[in-house]
Image: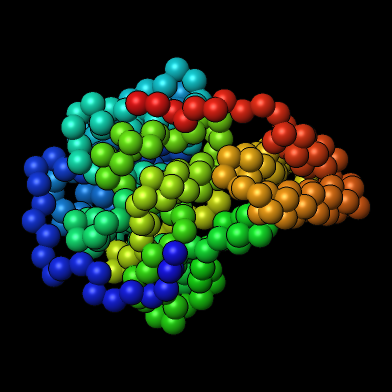
Amino acid sequence: MDFGSQKHLYPSKYIPMTRSLAIIIVNWNSYDDTAACLSSLRQLTFAAYEIVVVDNASEDGSGQRLKDEFDEITLLVNSKNEGFTGGNNRGIQYALDAGFEYLMLLNNDTIVTPGFVQPLLQVLQAHDVGAVQPKILYESERNIIWNAGTGFNRWGFFPYTLGQGKADHAFGNHARRIPWITGCCFLVKAKIVREVGALDDQFFIYYEDTDWSLRIRKAGYHLQYEPASKIYHKVGRSHKNRSSEGEGNLSPFAHYITLRNHMYILRKHAKGIRFVTGWVYQCNKVSSYVLYFLFKARIKKMSAAAQGWLDGHKPMVDEEHKL
């Protein structure tokens, strides 16, 4: 598949349909971030949308506080923390049952620009594209790129982002096909979700967007990056330690879940020689992590990394999250 630059990918006008877009946001003990995101959504120039906030059993009362302040949202409350996958799947099911044509997963730690929706919908209207993402900049440095599209190493079998740390004007200014879409902002046609299923709950958080993307591509659809749409991201809120554990900025759980879920990606999607090379890459990666954490006396992280590698080899459920 050609992931090269492509210009003029959509027409100059898009006529919105009534109640066509559901914007799904997962909240977990994050009132300030989610409230800032919702405030930015109030400025949208696109009208045919509904905001669905899924509260993942927050312990700080933030779910109800958000509903009290933003009465326009639909609030769904989970009885326990279902993770990024389970939280979004609750919103996805609601949106499909309500008959929305398009679904957007949007991180709660993002700030959107008023016109970011229309260019994304134009891409989905004009092409055989199943899903699309915007250009994503750092919220703290709004002229610096966090994600300007994606790549995929076929031999190590791992995803990566493009443009991180580069100036906005200097990189990623042409639309292109991409191999996967970040769950930070993932706009997809509802009919495709009905076809391929929702997020795989086994991932909980991290790499679930890569898995979803690969499944959409296997169903025969293209994925697109559209730089005419821009949002800002407060990077890393979900994986940094919320309290200091004396072992750096990333929590042991973040290391555990990323190593485990990378193995899930490999086992679900890699075939033949690419499975072998990907497995070797993973062996080298986890070995380097364990040795580094041992050298730094970060015992919790060393244990978490090793456990993530081991758990990544345990049996998985064969079926995706069916709707």
User: Residue 222 at x, y = what percent?
Assistant: 36, 56
137 left or right of 158 in image:
left
Looking at the picture, does residue 175 appear above or below residue 316? below
Figure quadrant of residue 104? top left
61 left or right of 49 in image:
right
Looking at the picture, does residue 314 appear above or below residue 115? above
User: Residue 299 at x, y = what percent?
Assistant: 85, 40
User: Residue 8 at x, y = what percent?
Assistant: 24, 74
Please tell me which residue lies in front, 244 or 13. Answer: 13
> Which residue is at a point 23% across and 26% down the rendered structure image?
97
Outermost residue on the front side: it is 272
274 left or right of 125 in image:
right
Image quarter in which the C terminus is found: top left
> Which residue is at a point 62% across and 55% down the rendered structure image?
158
Outermost residue on the bottom side: it is 170
Residue 283 visible in the snapshot: yes
> Which residue is at a point 63% across and 40% down the rendered structure image?
267
Image quarter in which the N terminus is found: bottom left
Counting the numbered discs, the total is: 0
> Which residue is at a point 57% across and 25% down the rendered structure image?
317
252 left or right of 2 in image:
right
User: Residue 203 at x, y = what percent?
Assistant: 56, 35
Colour approach in the figure: rainbow
Residue 131 visible in the snapshot: no
Outermost residue on the top side: it is 79
Figure quadrant of residue 7? bottom left
